[in-house]
Image (cartoon, rainbow, N blue to C red):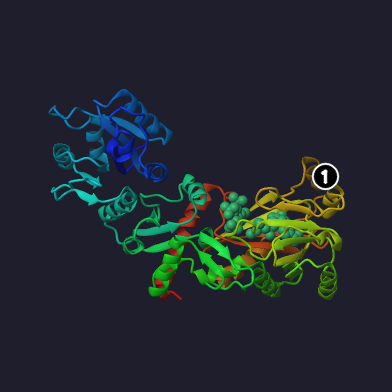
Amino acid sequence: MAVERPVRLVLDASLLLDPVEGGGTGEVAPALRPGAEALLRRLRYSNLGVAICGPKEMPMNVSDFLEKTANVHSFGYTLLPAPSGHVLLDESMLEWSRSSSCFYATSRVDEDLFSALQSHKWRVIAVDNERGTEDSGVVNISKLEELLLTLATLIKKEIASSSVLMVGYAMKQSREQDFAKRGSFPLYPSKNGLIFVPLSFELPLASQLNEVDMILHKMTDEIVSIDPNCSISFPKGISFSAGMSEIIRFMEEYPDFCIIDPFKNISPLLDRLQIQEILVRLQELGTEGRPKLRAPHSLKVKNFHGSELQKQLAETNLSFPLIVKPQVACGVADAHNMALVFQVEEFSNLSVPLPAILQEYIDHGSKIFKFYVIGDKVFHAVKNSMPNASLLKSSSGDEPLTFNSLKTLPVATKEQLLQNRVQDNRSLDIDVVEKAAKCLKESLGLTIFGFDVVVQEGTGDHVIVDLNYLPSFKEVPDSEAMPAFWDAIRQSYESKKGKGQT
Ligand SMILES: O=P(O)(O)O[C@@H]1[C@@H](O)[C@H](OP(=O)(O)O)[C@@H](OP(=O)(O)O)[C@@H](O)[C@H]1OP(=O)(O)O
Ligand SMILES: Nc1ncnc2c1ncn2[C@@H]1O[C@H](COP(=O)(O)OP(=O)(O)O)[C@@H](O)[C@H]1O
Ligand SMILES: [Mg+2]
Ligand SMILES: [Mg+2]
């Protein structure tokens, strides 16, 4: 392993190979056992020095398979000397124990190897050993899925600092992977003393929460369905996966357990109508001589019946073009299916889910400012966005322009962007938005959230069109985002512990 790491972990082949697929005998093509791939994926970005090892006398195809697996995950690969000899440990393993805390995880019982390792200060973790081991120094666990939590607990004990905190996180795999790749979830503590472990819905929750100090979660990743006839107010109308439901029940029973962030605080961001109400309250912040910060004029509708709509639009002073968004803001597959509508006839057969929010379309010269509040830090990035309505209308004919905002957002072409640059006189007043960000943080009671700002052509109004819980903030450079992320979590924990959680 090239990089010096303070904690080393060696995974024995027996732990990774699927016993059903020959278990490394070489008779059939070797394969990873269930759960091993997820373990390797998570260890890759754990900030531990990881290596895979196997006995020297392994069949060639098994050894090749393990070496390839190690390479794919950027791990080291090492071979253990034959058990018959006097030397049981490879030179590199001896070297590691001189400079690092070392852990050896295996599924096979080899008392001689275990005592050789232990005599060089290695900790042995035996997983799912059929006969177990009597050796008192060996940590026995029954499932591969328990390994990360066990490691985290041992590392925390070894560091023996009361300031190290363990964060159990729950979110969908793709999001976890995006965060992990940036080094967000280290098993060896972050600079400010946080250890991250995934909460597994396959294992009893209570025993996991016994070890962790707090839960970090994206609850909307675990929504199964939302009742469109129910006004969204957690937990009413929302059904969650079995795993998330268990966390919710746990929190009801132990309301003082630290959770980032409480379900009730996130709940309004599931509903574009409630988002609108929050944003309207922000308008009171306005300062003389500064651009106006506001919410877009909006209207909630339960159907797209033309005559009814026309009346409602007239009453609310809304005019075309309108952007139509589902009232449910996230957590369900179609929450990002939207449309730009230029005239009332285009509402017939519109494919946006109901109830929906109709919003004035703000011409903003295809530039959107993505703001991220991460604890007490505010970051922003500029992104290409939708062009002005006149440009979109000419391409849509008499049809509404339908799109999925995450996948098929109709952003400006290169020519349109170039044209905007020539006319660009819209500037962002960062102070105005940062002031709004601080107020939002206070009123929402959230640790990490994001919002989208467009600057209206002509008026220069700063219009907040979207508010999201725990966004990816991938536009913020890792060197700034990660320390802010870790500090935010730690501060949130400390302030909740200080106050007693509400
Ligand atoms: O994975 P999803 O559900 O599509 O989540 C999106 C997504 O994370 C998106 O991030 P990006 O990868 O497009 O940057 C978030 O946007 P921002 O980071 O721009 O806020 C969305 O907010 C996520 O959607 P949601 O949380 O509403 O499901
Ligand atoms: N009122 C609006 N006026 C102009 N453009 C808008 C408006 N609302 C949204 N947009 C554009 O549509 C995109 C998606 O809308 P948004 O409300 O942010 O949905 P999502 O929750 O899917 O991100 C925005 O990033 C912006 O480019
Ligand atoms: Mg958005
Ligand atoms: Mg959103």
Report which quarter residue 15 is drawn in. top left
- Residue for point 85% across, 63% down: 344
- Answer with left or right where residue 32 lies relative to residue 272: left
Nearer to the camera, 342 or 161 = 342
- Answer with left or right where residue 266 lies relative to residue 214: right
- Does the image show residue 454? no
Q: Considering only vertical position in the picture, is 81 above or below 403?
A: above
Nearer to the camera, 277 or 418 = 277
Report which quarter residue 32 is drawn in. top left
Q: Considering only vertical position in the picture, is 19 above or below 218?
A: above
Q: How many marks?
A: 1
Q: Does the beta carbon at disc 1 come under 8 Å from ligand 2?
A: no
* SS under mark 1: helix
From the top left corner, tell me how far across and down residue 436 is, in percent: 64, 67
Label 1 Cα neighbours within 10 Å, binned few <14 / some 14-19 / many ≥20:
few
Q: Considering only vertical position in the picture, is 194 above or below 84?
A: below
Report which quarter residue 163 is drawn in. bottom left
Query: Callout 1, which amino acid?
Result: Gln
From the top left corner, tell me how far across and down residue 502 is, in percent: 46, 76
- Residue for point 72% across, 68% down: 295
Nearer to the camera, 461 or 74 = 74
Q: If the image is split into quadrants, where does the N terminus sit?
A: top left
Residue position for label 1: 419
From the top left corner, tell me how far across and down residue 433 is, in percent: 66, 63
Q: Considering only vertical position in the picture, is 401 above or below 2?
A: below
From the top left corner, tell me how far across and down residue 316 is, in percent: 81, 74
Ligand 2 is found in the corner quadrant, namely bottom right
- Answer with left or right where residue 278 lies relative to residue 361: left
